[in-house]
């Protein structure tokens, strides 16, 4: 898979893809990630990337020309109907559809090339959305100062689902959310720490009993932290 990130703050990403699973996936050739400064695609003498909104109002809007040029450079066309198959152009925006594990799974399974456009300011010229963007995505109901943290969230959650990205010690099938429940509590040594003990059931080696305990605790935790995952339309699973 190839991931390209378009941003006006490329330095934001300086080391974020250099650790853990993403780093290993890059070194193994499972994914190639490149970050591009939108300003590099501005052709006017001041390299302008934003301008004032038509109709008035606060803030600035990202101009269409540099973003169209960047997409044409990366994909050979600025017509989303003509993108190579497996191409997604994602606009990170508060107006997007909510990002869920099921969306990460869909991208990991289907996408060969993902281009992420990080919004800023009051937004991005709507002609970018109408012409270039295949998927407008929000990562949740809170206000960020830009799409950059959201692009990192998408890249991380998608890359770890790619075939062979996880080490043999881990499995995406065991993830919290893959069965629609939160994870159970975990303990390691020492068995007693500052007077706090580990539940006896985890120490007795009865694996049927341990599995039953874990399932119960996962249900309890899900009910207390995320009751919404248990009721209604079953939340999003992988
Ligand atoms: C004035 C109205 N605001 C829209 C709700 C303006 C605005 C706020 C925040 C415009 C852009 C932003 C920057 N946020 C993102 O680009 C963003 C985002 C987010 O704020 N929350 C959750 N997911 C995302 S993805 C991109």
Image (cartoon, rainbow, N blue to C red):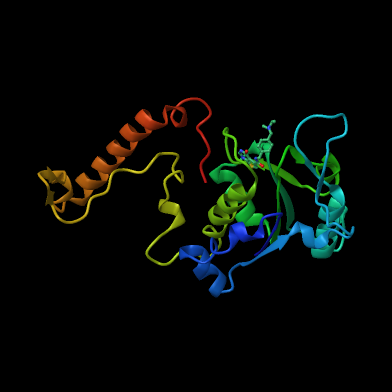
Q: Residue at x 62, y 51 (%)?
A: 151
Ligand 1 is in which quadrant of the figure? Answer: top right
Find the residue positioned furthest to the front.
Answer: 46
Left or right, residue 67 beside residue 26: right
Q: Residue at x 33, y 39 (%)?
A: 218
Query: Where residue 102 sits in the image (x, y, percent)?
Result: 57, 44
Q: Is residue 196 above or below residue 110?
A: above
Q: Residue at x 46, y 55 (%)?
A: 172
Image quarter for residue 47? bottom right
Observer-nearest residue: 21 or 208? 21
Image quarter for residue 115? bottom right
Left or right, residue 225 beside residue 131: left
Observer-nearest residue: 176 or 131? 131
Q: Residue at x 42, y 27 (%)?
A: 227
Indicate the quadrant containing the N terminus: top left, top right, bottom left or bottom right: bottom right
Query: Where residue 6 sits in the image (x, y, percent)?
Result: 72, 56
Find the residue positioned furthest to the top.
Answer: 232
């Amino acid at each position: 898979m190839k991931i390209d990130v378009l941003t006006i703050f490329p330095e934001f990403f300086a080391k974020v893809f250099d650790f853990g699973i993403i780093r290993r996936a890059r070194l193994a050739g499972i994914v190639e990630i490149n970050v591009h400064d939108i300003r590099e695609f501005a052709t006017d003498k001041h390299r302008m990337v934003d301008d004032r909104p038509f109709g008035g109002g606060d803030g600035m809007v990202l101009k269409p020309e540099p973003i169209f040029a960047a997409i044409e450079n990366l994909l050979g066309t600025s017509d989303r109907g003509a993108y190579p198959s497996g191409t997604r152009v994602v606009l990170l925006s508060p107006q997007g559809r909510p990002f869920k594990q099921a969306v990460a799974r869909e991208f990991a399974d289907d996408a060969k090339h993902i281009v992420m456009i990080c919004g800023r300011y009051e937004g991005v010229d709507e002609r970018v959305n109408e012409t270039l963007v295949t998927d407008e995505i929000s990562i949740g109901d809170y206000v960020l100062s830009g799409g950059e943290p959201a692009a990192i969230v998408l890249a991380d959650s998608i890359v770890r689902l790619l075939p062979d990205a996880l080490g043999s010690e881990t499995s995406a099938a065991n993830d919290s959310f893959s069965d629609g429940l939160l994870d159970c509590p975990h303990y390691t040594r020492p068995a007693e720490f500052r007077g706090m003990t580990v539940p006896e059931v985890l120490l007795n080696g009865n694996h049927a009993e341990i599995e039953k305990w874990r399932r119960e605790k996962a249900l309890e935790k899900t009910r207390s932290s995320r009751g919404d995952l248990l009721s209604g339309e079953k939340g999003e699973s992988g």
